[in-house]
Image (cartoon, rainbow, N blue to C red):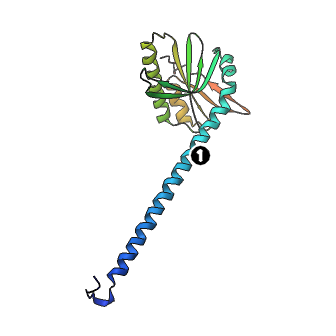
Amino acid sequence: MADIAYPNGFDFEQVWAELKEIREIQKETDRIVRENAKQLGGIHNRFGEIVEYMVAPNLQAKFREIGLSFQETSKDKVIMDKNGKFLFEIDILLENGEKALLVETKTKPTTEDVNDHVERLEKMRALADVKNDSRKFLGAVAGVVMTENVKDYALKKGFYVVEPSGETFSIIVPEGDYKQKAW
């Protein structure tokens, strides 16, 4: 290529070398962006864990105050099918002989999170039916930042809403126009 004369002093080899350098810089930039995204995802998950750890220790007592008694509490309960394939995870599961309450915890729940929880409860019901488990499955959504829109939506779907209240948290029961739903 050195034998080719380019007009106006154009140096093809220099341009080619600079393009290769730009390509290497772009690869490094892409690597940094992927690493930052991974770290931010980890931080987001940690915030969700904080919500879970804030709510879980007193959840049985709080539900007892509104007339629901649960003897067992599990966190991060993994549900698998009969072949050991992962189906879903339950952030907090409260259980007694007649009912099980699946609690989804988020820093700031969205309507999409509520819809995902409806699907989780439907899967839980289907799995329980296969196992002849006749317990009723109830749902709750817990969040630190709970917008009125999401709170209203969750209540319409028949979920209990768990949100901060002073030094602790409160549970809002679906009632009136909103009917508690059992799966």
Q: Where is residue 104, by image quadrant? A: top right
Q: Residue at x 49, y 24 (%)?
A: 79
**Residue located 35% across and 76% down the image:** 16
The residue drawn where x is 61% and y is 41% is 46
Task: Tell me the kind of residue under disc 1.
Answer: Ile
Which residue bears the numbered disc 1? 43
Q: Identify the residue at image location x=34%, y=84%.
A: 11
Return the residue found at the far right: 167
Q: 25 above or below 135?
A: below
Residue 175 at least partly seen: no
Q: In terms of depth relative to the viewer, which is nearer, 170 or 131?
A: 131
Relative to the observer, which residue lies in front, 33 or 16? 16
Q: Position of residue 135 (x, y in %)?
A: 52, 11
Pick the residue in front: 169 or 177. 169
The picture places residue 137, in percent across and down from the top left corner, at 51, 17
Q: Is residue 20 above or below residue 136?
A: below
Q: Residue furthest bottom?
A: 8
Q: Position of residue 66 (x, y in %)?
A: 65, 17
Q: Is residue 96 positioned above or below 109 on the image?
A: above
- Nearest the eye: 27 or 39: 27
Q: Is residue 82 left or right of residue 50?
A: left
Horizontal arrangement in the rendering, residue 63 relative to residue 118 (left or right): right
